Image: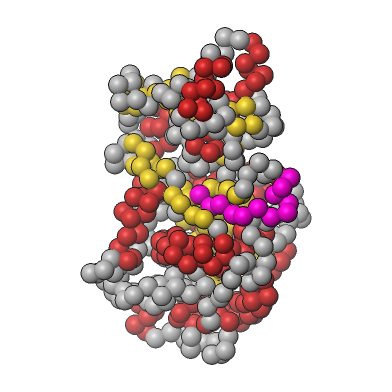
Amino acid sequence: MHDRTSVAALREGNPMGFFPPWRRVVCPFCFKRFHLSRCPQRHILPSSPTEPDTSIGTFLSIAAPEMGIVRPRIAKNPFYSLYRLFFSDGDWQGNARSVCPYCHMLLPNAMASGQLAGDVIAIIGARSSGKSNYFGVLLRALESRYADEVGFTIYDQETFSIREMRPVSSKRLYRERYGRLFDAVSRMAIDQNQSAAQDRDLRIPLIYRLEFPRRLRHYLTHPLSRRVPMDFVIFDAAGEDMEDPIAIEQFCRFILAAAGIIFIVDPLQFPGIRQRLSNSLLKRCPLLQVQPTEVVSRVINLFESRGSLKAGRKIKVPVAFTFSKSDVLKDLVHRSSPILRDSRHQHGFDEEGCRRLSEEVAECVREWDGPQLVNLARDKFHTASFFAMSALGQMPDENLAIEAVSPLRIADPLLWLLWQRGYIRGA
């Protein structure tokens, strides 16, 4: 069976992959960590028998849907179990695909074959901080500008549709969630009041593949690959989800599995900024119950309570503290401020430009909100930097209508994390 399976996997274009027995992957849906040898497989042919899948039902908080039967890998040969600790043999005769042993969602092909483990970039912020608009504009900007400017490839991977209960492309899910931002007739901003706790559809992430040219270090880590791949997982989690009993488990695993974190901070919540805003703008931007420092503190507490972080130690995951809606700051900072200028990352990450931006944003935080957030970044995170960006380049009107989307420094936080992870070089 072992030989027939390997041949079939190669025939289906999903060659077996090698991975060390201690290597684990993170499911891009439920964010649990496991070894690929534990993965069961789901029959995927239309004629395959079906049964109610309680694992998917529990994950999505719905009645168990009828799905293709999931069966464990059965090894008749005792040596096959040892073989499976080192090799992934892909699809079972092309009729089945590997699924997460916990939520039973289909795994991306490169992950299922052991070619890569996937990096999760966690993007967190309170509701109305601008996360959803950031997601929609960021992905469009990566495809249309930064992939060519920095020098990498980006394309969408398969995800899942709750409405149709079947796999769909991330590009299609992107159009459903964020397409209104770029509608030629009536451009609309995204409603910022939903979260994964309220909307089950938001528990399904968008998954994109990023591929980078090999750098010197990659000749050891990826000796047989011409390009270095990573999967970029977009999951719309609000800081308030940490208080919701339904979403808390997925949210916690999402944070603890992250290779990098982007905190989206709404500057319109800062007292020093609100006292300078007009009454009409204040009515449209009410003061939220959850402040930016509270969201950051909750994440720190999560690492200490569930991530085995000892008291007094710093979190090693690199963190980008990012002002959203920086377009509203044009009358509050000097006109030569880097906050108001777009960045360029020609053939790599602009280290010096973003260092100056970080210093300026940190000083603005101290002036407008006090030193607490800056002190948390310095004392609780091993590597942290401050950014400012605007996804839309403007404030939507009362009906969420916008003019042409004009992003400003939209990709800086992500490119900084990719630079920290060694995927792109400094420029």
The residue furthest left is: 185
Residue 114 in the image: state x and y as whole percent: 59, 34
Q: Is residue 324 above or below residue 121?
A: below
Q: Residue furthest right?
A: 312
Please tell me which residue lies in front, 214 or 50: 214
Q: Residue 371 at what x, y percent from top left? A: 66, 74
Say which residue appears at 30% left-offset and 63% top-offset: 180
Q: Is residue 371 visible?
A: no
State the residue in front, 65 or 426: 426
Q: What residue is shown at x 67% (from left), y 19% (from top)?
A: 82
Residue 215 is one of the magenta-drawn residues: yes
Residue 60: image location, x then y, percent: 39, 38
Q: Is residue 20 above or below residue 244?
A: above
Which part of the image, by quadrant, shows the C terminus?
Answer: bottom right
Q: Is residue 205 magenta?
A: no
Residue found 35% across the figure and 63% down from its top: 190
- Tell me: residue 68, above or below residue 157: above
Report whether 194 appears left or right of 208. Answer: left
Residue 86, by quadrant, is top right
Q: Position of residue 336 (x, y in %)?
A: 57, 89
Q: Is residue 313 visible?
A: yes
Quadrant of the image occupied by residue 260? bottom right
Image position of 227 (left or right of 57): right
Q: Which residue is drawn at the image coordinates 46% and 48% (left, top)?
A: 207
> Which stretch did the figure color magenta?
209-220
